Each structure stands twice: as C-alpha cells, then as structure tokens.
Image (tube, helix red, strand yellow):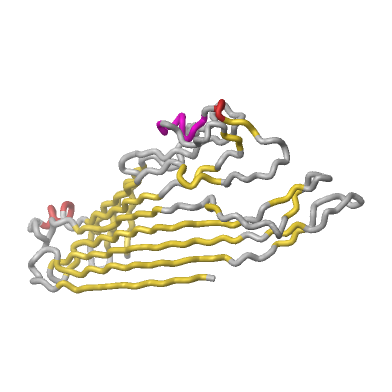
C-alpha cells in the first residue's frame, strides 16, 4: 500500500528585466508512506528425513517507511536568460520493521514462530531519518552579453560563459546494532563519544546471556548511529562552439571537496578487542578530481 499526499505553492515575482534576482520561487511539501503488507511466508523446516519435524515455520514481517519532504526551488534570471537556480530538499523519514518474536523448542532447540506473541516495532537497519541536499547551478557573470562583458573574441572563447554547479548533501547514519548483552551499568551511551568509544564499551559493565535465551533487547539503537558527515561535490563546465554544427563541451568535476572521510559503524562483537570502536576504514571515496570532454557533431 502506498500513500502519497503532496501540496505545492508557486509565486511569480515580476521585476524589471535588468534587476538581478528576477524569476520565480516555488516551495513544495510532500508526505509519503510506503507500507508493505505482511504476507506469511511458510517454509518447511530444513531437517533430514526420519527425524522429528516440529512443523512449518511462519514468518510474517511488516516493513514501512513514513516520510515528510520539504522542497524549495529558486531561479534567478536576467532579462530572458537564466543566470542560476538552487534547489533545497529536506526529508524527515522513519523506516520501521515489525518482525515476530521467536520461540525456542525445548526438544531440539530449534526456532519456530509463535504467532500468538505480540509483534515488536523497531527501526529497520536502513533507517536514515534526516536527508538534506542543497544543489544549484550558476552561470558565471563574465563573457559576451553578461554582466562582466568580454569583448575580445579570443578572451571570451577561453574565459567567458562558464557554468558552475554544486550539490551539498547530508544523510543520517544507519542505526548501530544493539549488542545482546546484560548491562549492569545501565548506560549504553559513551560518556564522551569518540572513535574508540562510540558507545559504552566498558566490558566490566556487560555479561553475555545464557545460550538459547529469548532476546528481549531491541535489535538497533534509535539514537546511536553510524558516523555521517556532510559531503560537497562541485563541477565547472564550458561549451566551445566552433561552427553551428560542431561544439565541444569541457567539464571538470570535484567530488568530496573537503576530503571528509565517513567511517564505518562500530564493532559490536563483545569478544573482539575492538568492541565499541569504529572500524579503521573509510566508507566513502576520498577527494576525486576528474575531467571530461564531449564532442557534438
């Protein structure tokens, strides 16, 4: 089942063509939900013939995503020519899953699904509540017919009519898996969060549960998440026109301008020496510069 509700408002602002900033403004609010209806998935217990069979296993999982998005579109014009535009998008979302509880058999310690037990309601492992992006393009103001006119044909060919565009993004990190441990200290958050203490990893506070114990702790922390940092990508392009038919488009792109690393989530293995510490890796690419050319004919 998909539900979508959207409202939009657009207002035109009329100004003299020679004034900067003339153009239009549009704001949009969107709220949507995507709910997958639970369908029992019956799978026969995987046992060899001749052994006791506890019957089929029932799995019924509800997954849902609830989101509200706000968008702002803005365009600047000079006369009848566009000079740039910006788009700001922000999404607040929650992705949840409701898997059924499991029941352990006392005979073979096999897991069967207990349909009579209430379902739990928890965050999905792909939940990212905040999604912010700011993108736009800008025709640089120097070149023939622009604010800073370049009358020399050779100078205009190389320095005029460049276009700059960018995209700034920020996404929340995924929820950190919640270790299935007995916490005697009662506090899961680190006193001062850093890469060596992403959550409270004082092992003296914890003890493992007995084997075949029914888990009652949530699968994921709602407020302890994998690292996430803003990212900025920019590009600069220009089209060189040789004739009416032939033209060359040159484009330079710079990804992760600030060279900001995004680290993976912490180690949640209680038996590991790195328990509660961030993995010594980088999830995203370091700064990348690339150039491209496209010939039109």
At horizontal 31% and vertical 43% (from top left) the residue drawn is: 257
| 198 inside magenta stretch | yes
Judge whether 297 appears above or below 54 on screen.
below
**Closer to the camera, 75 or 102?**
102
At horizontal 32% and vertical 63% (from top left) the residue drawn is: 71
| 99 inside magenta stretch | no
At horizontal 8% and vertical 66% (from top left) the residue drawn is: 19
Mark count: 0
Q: Position of residue 66 (x, y in %)?
A: 47, 62
**Closer to the camera, 37 or 295?**
37
For the C terminus, give its image quadrant. Answer: bottom left
**Closer to the camera, 267 or 251?**
267
Judge whether 258 appears above or below 10 on screen.
above
Residue 59 lies left or right of residue 228; in this view the side is right
Asked which quadrant contains residue 23, the reply is bottom left
Residue 52 lies left or right of residue 280; in this view the side is right
Main SS, magenta residues: loop
At horizontal 66% and vertical 36% (from top left) the residue drawn is: 209
In the rendered image, the residue lying farthest to the right is 50
For the N terminus, give its image quadrant. Answer: bottom right
Judge whether 181 appears above or below 33 on screen.
above
Region in magenta: 192-201
Q: Position of residue 138 (x, y in %)?
A: 21, 58
Q: Position of residue 249 (x, y in %)?
A: 29, 57
Asked which quadrant contains residue 90, the reply is bottom left
């Amino acid at each position: 089942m998909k539900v979508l509700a959207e409202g939009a408002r657009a207002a035109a602002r009329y100004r003299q063509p020679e004034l900067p900033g003339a153009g239009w403004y549009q704001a949009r609010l969107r709220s949507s939900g995507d709910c997958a209806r639970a369908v029992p998935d019956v799978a026969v217990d995987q046992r060899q013939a001749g052994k006791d069979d506890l019957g089929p296993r029932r799995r019924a999982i509800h997954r849902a995503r609830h989101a509200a998005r706000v968008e702002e579109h803005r365009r600047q014009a000079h006369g009848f020519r566009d000079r740039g535009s910006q788009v700001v998008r922000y999404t607040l979302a929650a992705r949840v899953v409701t898997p059924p509880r499991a029941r352990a058999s006392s005979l073979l310690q096999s897991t069967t699904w207990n349909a009579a037990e209430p379902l739990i309601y928890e965050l999905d492992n792909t939940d990212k509540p905040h999604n912010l992006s700011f993108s736009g393009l800008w025709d640089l103001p120097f070149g023939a017919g622009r604010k800073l006119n370049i009358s020399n044909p050779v100078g205009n060919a190389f320095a005029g009519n460049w276009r700059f565009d960018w995209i700034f993004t920020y996404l929340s990190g995924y929820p950190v898996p919640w270790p299935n441990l007995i916490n005697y200290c009662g506090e899961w958050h680190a006193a001062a969060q850093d890469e060596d203490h992403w959550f409270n990893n004082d092992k003296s506070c914890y003890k493992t549960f007995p084997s075949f114990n029914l888990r009652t702790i949530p699968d994921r922390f709602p407020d302890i998440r994998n690292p996430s940092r803003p990212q900025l990508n920019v590009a600069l392009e220009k089209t060189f026109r040789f004739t009416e038919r032939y033209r060359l488009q040159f484009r330079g792109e710079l990804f992760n301008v600030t060279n900001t690393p995004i680290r993976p989530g912490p180690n949640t293995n209680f038996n590991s020496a790195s328990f509660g510490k961030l993995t010594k890796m980088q999830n995203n690419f370091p700064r990348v510069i690339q150039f491209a050319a496209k010939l039109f004919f």
